């Protein structure tokens, strides 16, 4: 092949390749991603605004395009910091706020849920009951065992129906050598809206020359502070020598009620001098604002000298358990630097943070913008708290000074000195043991895996900063 032909051949190949390449089809554009409905995007925008602003871990919030998030609750969960076990979202903020104030639809009982090791069978057992409620009217009492829901076995999928259903028929059981067997028929109940005063039991017992006041407190609710006043006044009139407060099932509540209780029982000099009870650590943005403007009310809670009753005690016993959370732990750790705080029972829940109820009106001035999602709300963690000695981050809870197991199966009433936790506190106070009534021993091993009062249990474990006003944050 001559040199000229060779170059001509190469040129022809280049032209053919260029032609083929030029005719190659261009890739089709990717189809447009479908966006979430407008209302969903508006709700997502509200969530995004709040979490990037007031959330304690706001700097850790991931940047997610809200246009493509179709479920606001799932989107909210994606924003939570890995350490956060508590922040909450709801599409019924009125019910959420009602539960914080002791108004909610329920049966009126608190239950522990367990399984027997030998059979794997699920059961529920009554911890306590509010008076004049569906559960009380049905004749249920502390220690009663529930083995069936609507004639079906209790399972890991349906057990919380015992707290959240509108109507129930439950089968009661009795404990035998091989587990639970039916007792005496069924009990039917219809849940209803209840007003729940958290001061359930107040009594005085005498033992070895001591007069010991006992208070069972179910939840920290400021609008029932007058019930605390009545209880403490009763103890003063009875001239008690010692005080035992039972918060073993108390999931928490508001800071106003917690600081009120602390101020009602702490040493008089501490209360009258308004010593520091608790301090807050916000995210960097809000912490700097409060420090710069020296707004101390947003950084700490002092003891208050305006409580109706001041007991002026130097020692208090708290009965505790895994249900002792949030504002209950606030009370224990807040008082600890100033008086002898003795805990009896089991390790507390471990919640060292506080939250606020955030609603759309916080971020939008025009009601017309959010009127179609105005009942949505967030309960984000906004502060970490510490006592006056800096104790915080107690994520594993507070271990008890005196370890005692709860004896739910015994059915011993709350406030009875034969109750093992109360008996241990009495012995610690007097140095003399309580001779307990003989009860049948529980031979069948079991495990308690959950407990609760209503479908709002997650909410109740929040420590709500109800002393902080919205206009302080957005002034």
Image (cartoon, grey):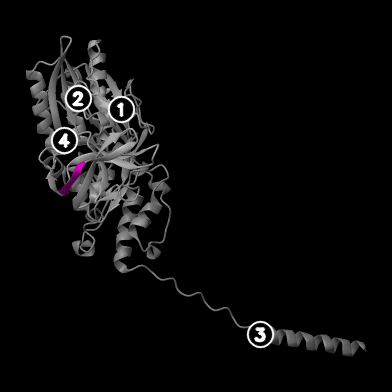
Tags 4 and 3 touching, CB below 8 Å: no
Spatial separation of the CA atoms under disc 3 and disc 2 = 84 Å
| Residue 22 image label | 3
Q: Nearer the viewer, mark 1 or mark 3?
A: 1
Q: Nearer the viewer, mark 2 or mark 4?
A: 4
Mark 4: which secondary structure?
Answer: loop
Spatial separation of the CA atoms under disc 1 and disc 4 = 25 Å
Q: Residue 186 in magenta?
A: yes
Spatial separation of the CA atoms under disc 4 and disc 3 = 81 Å
Mark 3 burial class by Cα count in 10 Å: few <14, some 14-19, many 20+: few
Mark 2 burial class by Cα count in 10 Å: few <14, some 14-19, many 20+: some
Tell me residue 184's x, y (percent).
19, 41
Residue under numbered circle 2: 274
Spatial separation of the CA atoms under disc 2 and disc 4 = 26 Å
Q: Does residue 219 appear in this view?
A: no
| Mark sitting earlier along the chain (2/1) | 2
Q: Which residues are magenta?
A: 184-189
Q: Residue 126 in magenta?
A: no
């Amino acid at each position: 092949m001559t040199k000229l032909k060779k170059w001509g051949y190469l040129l022809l190949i280049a032209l053919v390749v260029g032609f083929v390449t030029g005719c190659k089809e261009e890739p089709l554009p990717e189809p447009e991603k479908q966006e979430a409905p407008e209302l969903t995007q508006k709700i997502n925008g509200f969530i995004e605004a709040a979490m990037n602003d007031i959330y304690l871990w706001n700097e850790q919030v991931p940047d997610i395009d809200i246009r493509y998030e179709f479920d606001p609750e799932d989107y909210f969960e994606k924003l939570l910091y890995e350490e956060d076990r508590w922040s909450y979202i709801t599409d019924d903020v009125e019910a959420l706020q009602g539960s914080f104030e002791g108004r909610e639809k329920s049966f009126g009982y608190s239950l522990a849920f367990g399984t027997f090791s030998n059979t794997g069978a699920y059961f529920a057992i009554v911890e306590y009951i509010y008076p004049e409620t569906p559960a009380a009217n049905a004749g249920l009492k502390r220690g009663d065992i529930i083995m069936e829901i609507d004639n079906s076995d209790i399972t890991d999928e349906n057990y919380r129906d015992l707290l959240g259903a509108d109507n129930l028929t439950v089968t009661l059981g009795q404990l035998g050598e091989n587990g639970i067997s039916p007792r005496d028929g069924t009990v039917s109940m219809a849940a209803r809206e209840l007003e729940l005063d958290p001061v359930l039991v107040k009594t005085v017992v005498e033992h070895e020359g001591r007069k010991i006041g006992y208070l069972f407190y179910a939840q920290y609710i400021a609008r029932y502070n007058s019930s605390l006043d009545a209880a403490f006044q009763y103890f003063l009139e009875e001239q008690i020598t010692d005080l035992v407060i039972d918060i073993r099932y108390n999931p928490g509540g508001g800071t106003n009620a917690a600081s009120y209780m602390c101020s009602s029982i702490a040493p008089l000099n501490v209360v009258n001098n308004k010593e520091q009870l608790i301090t807050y650590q916000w995210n960097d943005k809000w912490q700097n604002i409060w420090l710069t403007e020296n707004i101390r009310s947003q950084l700490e809670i002092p003891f208050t000298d305006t409580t109706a009753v001041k007991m002026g005690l130097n020692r208090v016993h708290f009965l505790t358990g895994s249900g002792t959370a949030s504002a209950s732990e606030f009370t224990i750790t807040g008082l600890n630097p100033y008086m002898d705080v003795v805990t009896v029972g089991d390790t507390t829940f471990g919640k060292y943070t506080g939250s606020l109820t955030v609603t759309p009106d916080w971020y939008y001035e025009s009601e017309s913008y959010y009127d179609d999602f105005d009942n949505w709300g967030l309960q984000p963690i906004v502060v970490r708290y510490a006592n006056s000695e800096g104790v915080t981050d107690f994520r594993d809870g507070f271990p008890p000074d005196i370890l005692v197991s709860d004896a739910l199966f015994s059915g011993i009433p709350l406030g009875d000195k034969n109750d093992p936790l109360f008996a241990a506190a009495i012995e610690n106070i007097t140095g003399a043991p309580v001779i307990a009534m003989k009860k049948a021993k529980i031979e069948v091993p079991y495990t308690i895996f959950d407990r609760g009062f209503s479908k709002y249990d997650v909410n109740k474990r929040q420590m709500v900063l109800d002393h902080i006003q919205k206009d302080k944050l957005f002034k």
